[in-house]
Amino acid sequence: MFFVEAGYHRNPGRVAGQVHYISHREEGLADGRRRELYGIGERYRALRGDEPAIRKAFREDGRGLRNPVYFRFILTVDNPTAKCFQRLDGHLSERVLRDAVERTFRGAARGAQGVFAVHQHGGHDRPAHPHVHALLSPRFENRMAVHLSPVRIQRVKERWEREVLAGLQRQEPRLDRARDALTHTLAQRPRAMGERQPGQLLPLRAAARRDGPLELLATARKSVRLVRSSGQARRWLVFGRRRSRWQDDPERAVRRAVFRLATRIMPTPIREALWRLRGLRGIGLQQR
């Protein structure tokens, strides 16, 4: 069963200390940190957690009332529900509690306004037990003095439990879908090259590629040794008589070298005929 504590006082001087308490203290926040103050009602929501402005608004609401009543609520959950909250991260857990607080007061105490803060620390045997501290203004949103009967307070308790459980039910399917999507993504993820499945034997070493860089390097070394050892090959691999010919027109230099190599292996009469024909320019043949 959820536990809801409701109390009130008529001392405007205690309000500033209570606002400071629910925002800064209970388990003691260090380094000046504080919890976010959320508003109940349009006026206090517009203050956006500005603590000095909230204290000023409480003082203004108490003016003109002979006996202003300031209600304070502590809204908690039971142990099974606290275990369900452990499945959520801190931001999502706070979001569920925020929605539950706003729906609770809008449904069971319509017109009430004030501030609240979410506490997520635990106590003895409660490592994580989220709960809410709420402080209501002495005036409703229509400026009438606040009066909450025991019947309405009981409705707040019942509505709080219903809204918290409904919020968790809305979040749990989303968590299941997110977990299933993550599992599916990990299962479908393509494994990187060389990554082994658990328990898989190491693959056999692949044979060296014959067209790889190492084989090309070995072939180049053999060719260089052959050219250096053969004066004939070294002479015919020179692409031109002038050194600048290869730099000016590499394609033409290659064609000339290939032509010279091809005619070298031909019979002498054919080779001399080709050279004579190559030198003719008046019969429409272009020298290449």
Image (spheres, rainbow, N blue to C red):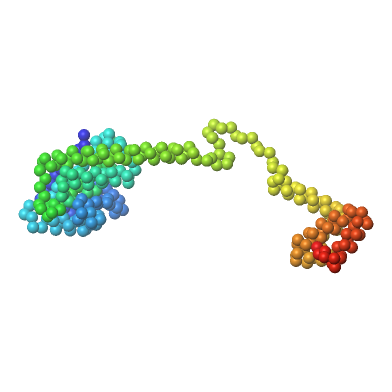
Q: Nearer the viewer, residue 133 or 246?
A: 246
Q: Is residue 30 left or right of residue 201?
A: left
Q: Residue at x 87, y 62 (%)?
A: 277
Q: Is residue 260 left or right of residue 119?
A: right
The answer, for residue 126, to whether it is visible in the render is no
Q: Is residue 81 left or right of residue 249?
A: left
Q: Quadrant of the N terminus?
A: top left
How far from the left and from the top, in percent, is residue 27? 26, 45
How far from the left and from the top, in percent, is residue 22? 22, 49
> Residue furthest toward the left?
66
| Quadrant in which residue 160 is drawn | top left
How far from the left and from the top, in percent, is residue 183? 44, 37
Q: Is residue 61 above or below residue 166?
A: below
Q: Residue at x 78, y 59 (%)?
A: 254
Q: Nearer the viewer, residue 159 or 268?
A: 268
Q: Is residue 99 above or below residue 125?
A: below
Q: Quadrant of the C terminus?
A: bottom right
The answer, for residue 91, to whether it is visible in the render is yes
